[in-house]
Image (cartoon, rainbow, N blue to C red):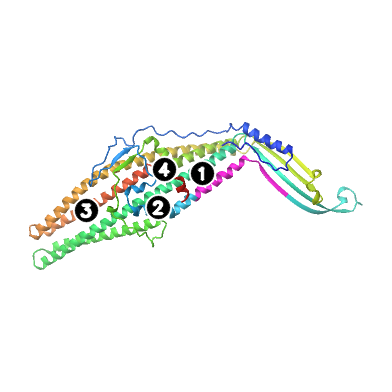
Amino acid sequence: MMPHASLRTAPALPAAVRACLAGAALAVLALGGCAVGPDFKRPVAPSTDRYTAEPQPQSTAAAGGTAQTFVPGADIPAQWWTVFHSGKLNALVEQALKNNPDVTAAQAALRKAHEDLLAQEGSFFPHVDGTAGATRQKISAAEFGQPSGGSYIYNLFNATANVSYTLDVWGGVRRSVEAAGAQADYERFELEATYLSLAANVVTTAIQDASLRAQVEATSEIIGADRQQLKTVEKQLSLGGVSRLDVLTQQTQLATELASLETLKKQLNQNRDLLAVLVGQLPSAPPEAQFGLDDLTLPAEMPLGVPSRLVERRPDVRASEAQLHQASANVGVATANMLPQITLTGQFGDYSTTASDLFKSSSNVWSLGGSITQPLFHGGELLHKRRSAVAAYDQAAAQYRGTVLTAFHNVADALHALESDAAVLEQQNVAASAAADSLNLARKRYASGSISPLDLLVVQRTYWQARIAQLQAQAARYADTAALYQALGGGWWNRDAAATASR
């Protein structure tokens, strides 16, 4: 950033002082293109045309009658969670974005960084300080070698303006402003990352709420059927039709299911606690909205962002890039601190023994000066600070590369997960349907005495496990859909700036 071309001075300053300041401005402009340290350049995006080692399929399996098609280059809506077509979910995400303290903290951090940038830009201007004073003093002539001169009482009034300006010869000030600007960019993208992660957490927590409720309901239905089965077995025992072992086995199965139901209820309650905190409420006041898997619509078309643009759209990558930029600028600051510093100073004021004469031309005093400071020996402090800045830049560069790798890793994992989820759900649907048919057949055969209670118990356990696995696979497909939207950056670049500022 270049220094400002004009310097404003008070009208009372004399022509000599104004000329000095104008000369300082011209000197800065003349040297404006010279700034020590590296000039930052954005890292080049990875040169790859896909996220996974194997070619990405065009669509997933049509599990549950719905296949998801991947659309290369498709854009992501700013409010990406609306793709699930759930009004309850949309309202919950918006509530979280308004009330979550992490968002409030990130917004405050951005405001602070912006004010710090504006404060740092003040270094482009000269520093002007005004002072005024009045004193009443008694002196003795003896102080000046006149023993018989008596003493004198007088008043002294003064008003002065002090001006100082350090020429940014080596660009140290410009690099400091550049670093402050990079810090502001970092906080801006950290805020975007907070929005993205919060929305994704609300969505996945709501999906988990739906999944757990479905598992609780399914387990409760199975428990109800097994209670009836236990009563039947106990009646058969009283009639001598089965052994005590058959009753104990059925009781064991029922107790296992009841324990699993309590575990599911615990997970559901803890999930509700998390949902309350995400939307900025105490766990004692969780959101009223409750979710079912049928409340959500699985998107049929999924965006498949261009790999070369991922580094531009992931807020965590952009935040890491801003840190790299800041580290680069700090190398320039540390380098400039090792070089000569030129400072111009000026003073203009009035001194008078009477207040009425204070601003007359006869009371004017002024001075102009300049100084140059060259660090000679600081015990290696400045040299090692520069080396430290270079090491910090190397660290930031490595962290940036790691963040980019993580971004591509997230997308690849989400794509693999969606492909696998559809295949798993397809097979779990088959398994759950077959297990349900087997259970119905086993119950009929048991009623006719064709199989033992133990045989029926094995079929019951298989059905219960298949049904729970089916529900978990269905929820995983929703959750991994949200994960892909998050991995691709969440569409923040499409959000209206005014809507962001109003939050």
Q: Residue at x 33, y 35 (%)?
A: 50
State the SS at label 1. Answer: helix
State the SS at label 3. Answer: helix
Q: Amino acid at mark 1?
A: Ala
Residue 338 lies in quadrant: top right
In magenta segment, residue 113: yes
- Tell me residue 21's x, y (percent): 68, 37
Q: Choose mark 1 or mark 2, whichever is in front.
A: 2
Q: Choose mark 3 or mark 1, whichever is in front.
A: 1
Q: Residue 370: in sight, yes or no?
A: no
Q: Which residues are magenta?
A: 108-131
Instruction: Tell me the distance, in whole angstroms, between the alpha carbons under discs 4 and 3.
Output: 40 Å
Q: Earlier in the sequence, mark 4 or mark 3?
A: 3
Q: Which mark is residue 184?
A: 1
Q: Which mark is residue 468?
A: none
Q: Earlier in the sequence, mark 2 or mark 3?
A: 2
At label 4, counting other C-alpha atoms closer than 10 Å, the crowd grade (few under 14, some 14-19, many 20 or more) is few
Q: Which mark is residue 494?
A: 4
Q: Amino acid at mark 2?
A: Glu
